[in-house]
Image: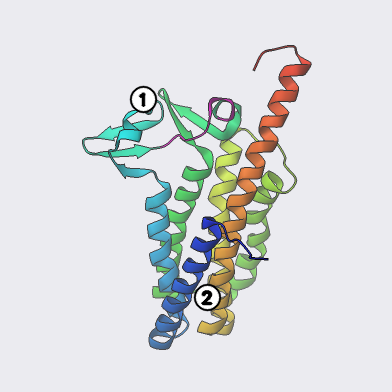
Amino acid sequence: MVLEISDNHKYLVSFIVIATGFILVSGLFYGSKGPLIVLLLGALILAIRISGIRFMSESIKRMGPWMVTRFGSLVIVHSHHIKKLRENGKEFKIKGKYFCTGCYGMCFGICISVVLIIYYIIYGFNSATIIPLFSLIPFLFIPIILRYLIFILMKPPLRFISNVFLPLGIVLLLCIIDKLFQNWVINGIYELLLIGIAFFRWKIAKIDDRRLLKRIHASNEFFGRNI
């Protein structure tokens, strides 16, 4: 029996291998701060990716004006859900344009996290602030847990905030781990776990879309409306 591996899993394995190499090299040269620098660069790339910045293509030309904003040959694709999901909380609307709560919540949270990483690398944290900062972490993760694992329905603003808090919690926890242990191996292991968490979050989001569609379908059947 041959084990078949999907393209997504191949990309995940390749990304883990590449990330391990960067973490190893950065740790050997820069110590415990090395993995933080790798995370900083990765966060910037991810923020650009999920912001929807793209070059114009034929497929983008076919998108509706509510989905993209054009700047010459550059475009920002800020809407990608089907109509049923878009109108049931997956996206919010500003001046006739739809924006994905997940992508832009994460993007905004990553941008704040980048500032936090830079501040920590340059100035560090005072020992007296570790306990207050650590006590803040559960509150940053609770919204996303309610959102995806318990499947509490949220309006777009709450969905947006839950996605803002996720990268903040992840980065804050890494900074505290570095402050406590000052060990690039521990930091590196934590960052490799983050890749798995990111992949898991992507899979959960797909499941969440299917569950929401089922709920919309059931609601329409109950009220006798056509979908």
Tell me the quadrant of the picture where the C terminus can be found.
top right
Q: Quadrant of residue 27?
A: bottom left
Residue 53 percent location from the top left of the image: 34, 44
Q: Is residue 43 left or right of residue 206?
A: left
Magenta span has 200? no
Per the image, label 2 sits on a secondary structure element best described as loop
**Dot 1 crowding, Cα within 10 Å, few <14, some 14–19, many 20+:** some
Give the colour scheme of this rendering.
rainbow
Q: Is residue 46 left or right of residue 58?
A: right
Q: Which mark is residue 126?
A: 2
Q: At x 37% / y 52%, what residue is drawn?
A: 48
Q: Quadrant of residue 129?
A: bottom right
Residue 128 percent location from the top left of the image: 59, 75
Q: At x 52% / y 67%, what residue is drawn?
A: 13
Residue at the far right in the pictured view: 222
The residue range painted magenta reads: 78-85
Q: Is residue 58 left or right of residue 134?
A: left
Tag 1: residue type? Answer: Pro
Q: Is residue 194 above or below residue 159?
A: below
Per the image, label 1 sits on a secondary structure element best described as loop
* Residue that badge 1 annotates: 65
Magenta span has 79? yes
Q: Nearer the viewer, residue 29 or 113?
A: 29
Q: Nearer the viewer, residue 225 or 34?
A: 225
Tell me the quadrant of the picture where the N terminus can be found.
bottom right
Q: At x 47% / y 27%, what residue is drawn?
A: 93
Q: Is residue 166 above or below residue 170?
A: above
